[in-house]
Image (cartoon, rainbow, N blue to C red):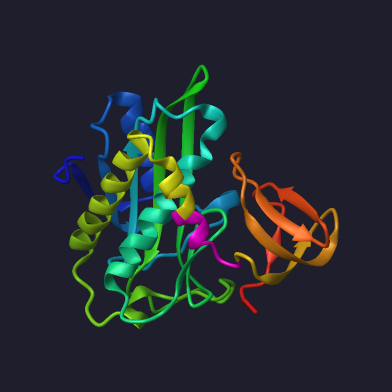
Amino acid sequence: MNVRTHIRLDSVSSTNEFMQFLVSMKRPAEGTVISAINQYAGRGQAGRSWHASPGKNISSSFIFYPDFVPARHQFRLNKLFAVSAVHFFRQFLREGNIRIKWPNDLLINGSKAAGMLIRVSTAGDLLRQAILGLGFNISEDQFPGDIPNPVSLCQYADHIPDIPILIGAFQEHLWADYKRLRAGRYPDLDREYTRNLFGMDQALQFTSPETGAFEGVIQGVDEFGRLLIQTGQDITAFQSGTLVFQLTEK
């Protein structure tokens, strides 16, 4: 990755949308990042809005061309990006427990510190390109009241560098982990993802439209990105967007 391939914008509705526009016009170098001081219409999972005060957070998008990844295994990218985010946050944390909340959020001590949105396109049975959009709460201190359990990195770090330096630090982690995936070291990334998965082997309360409220134990994530939950002797696979679960580990 060329860490100098960094397009900085003062203001944009969405870095993901801008990246999609850029990709439609030309083929940016792999690893190119677009960041914005003010992203005023960012989106997270399921079209939810993403709040970020100007200049206080990381709002950015990256482009990759993972044509070595089978389309049916695209969740490998989710695991890669989440593991890279864990590495990034741990670099600056003074204290606090960082965990991956399935599928694409990062929690510090059970509170949401980051979210990622991944859009892929395919060519036959392989992935063609992937756009990673991310929002990292860095120095945010004004969260909307309807956001549950938000937190910022600054609450758990002694020193926070400037945002461009932070983006460069994340690029380094991201590229190192991407090379691991390209080299066929997916099992390593898979183990790291599972080891850092919030609620792993813990009894949690869940709610789903099909079953209502229930208690279960997270057993990991399968090759298609479904969360595996054990209830009694049974293990059920849940698709993203079909579960709500508590953010307190027993």
Counting from the top left corner in percent of width and height, residue 18 is at 35, 40
Q: Is residue 202 left or right of residue 20?
A: right
Along the viewing direction, whichever of 88 and 199 lies nearer the viewer = 199
**Residue most toward the left?**
4
Q: Quadrant of residue 101?
A: bottom right
Specify the segment rendered in magenta. Answer: 192-199
Q: Quadrant of residue 37?
A: bottom left
**Residue most toward the right?**
211
Counting from the top left corner in percent of width and height, residue 176 is at 27, 47
The residue drawn where x is 49% and y is 61% is 195
Q: In which quadrant of the rendered image does the N terminus lie? A: top left
Counting from the top left corner in percent of width and height, residue 111 is at 51, 74
Q: Relative to 153, does residue 29 appear above or below in the rendering? A: above
Q: Relative to 90, does residue 120 appear above or below in the rendering? A: above
The residue drawn where x is 27% and y is 39% is 31
The residue drawn where x is 85% and y is 58% is 211
* Residue 195 magenta: yes
Q: In which quadrant of the rendered image does the C terminus lie? A: bottom right
Counting from the top left corner in percent of width and height, residue 67 is at 39, 25
* Residue 62 magenta: no
Residue 111 visible in the displayed image: yes
